[in-house]
Image (spheres, rainbow, N blue to C red):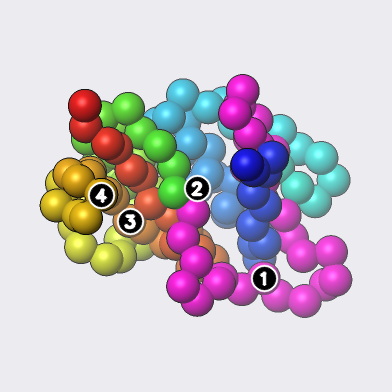
Amino acid sequence: MFSHVMLGVNDLEVSKKFYDAVLGTLGHGPGVANKNRYFYRSPTGTFAITTPINGEPACHGNGSTIGFTVASAEQGDAFHAAGVANGGTTCEDPPGFRETPAGKLYLAYLRDPDGNKLCALHRPG
């Protein structure tokens, strides 16, 4: 359904450090530069960060969340820890398993340095 997700950021290098760390826990290499953007490509899509091209400050979407699939709760814990260690902040409930109407899920939420909400999600077998 999606080809890519691009987030606006205010300090490109601070955000690159954050995303290199969290996406590195998922096996993705460092962001690849292209002008005022960094791209993280995978076989299933592209994630990118950019400074806004209109020159206005970047802002997060209230109510928006970008979810990343993780292979295990341990990988989700690593994702969350890497984010907090690299300028992110924890949000929502602590990382862990939750019973939901969709079944048991592992969820780990955090905000990037610009306040964008991210989630690591694992669906156990």
Residues at discs 3 and 4 in contact (Cβ within 8 Å): no
- Return the residue at label 3: 109
Report whether 105 appears left or right of 53.
Answer: left
Indicate which disc residue 58 carries. 1
Query: Quadrant of the image for the C terminus?
Result: top left
- What element does badge 2 sit on? helix
State yes or no: residue 40 in magenta: yes
Label 1 vs 2, first from the N-terminus? 2
Crowd band around label 1 with a 10 angstrom C-alpha radius: few (<14), some (14–19), many (20+): some
Q: Nearer the viewer, residue 81 or 43?
A: 43
Q: Earlier in the sequence, mark 1 or mark 3?
A: 1
Q: Are marks 2 and 4 in contact (CB under 8 Å)?
A: no
Lower sequence index among marks 2 and 3:
2
* Region rendered in magenta: 39-66
- Residue 42, compared with residue 16, is above or below; it is above
- Magenta span: helix, strand or loop, mainly? loop
Task: Mark 4 vs mark 1: give the one in front.
Answer: 4
Question: What residue is drawn where x is 33% and y is 43%?
Answer: 121
User: Which residue corresponds to mark 2?
Assistant: 18
Q: What element does badge 1 sit on?
A: loop
Query: From the viewer's perspective, is the residue at label 2 or at label 3 nearer?
Result: 3
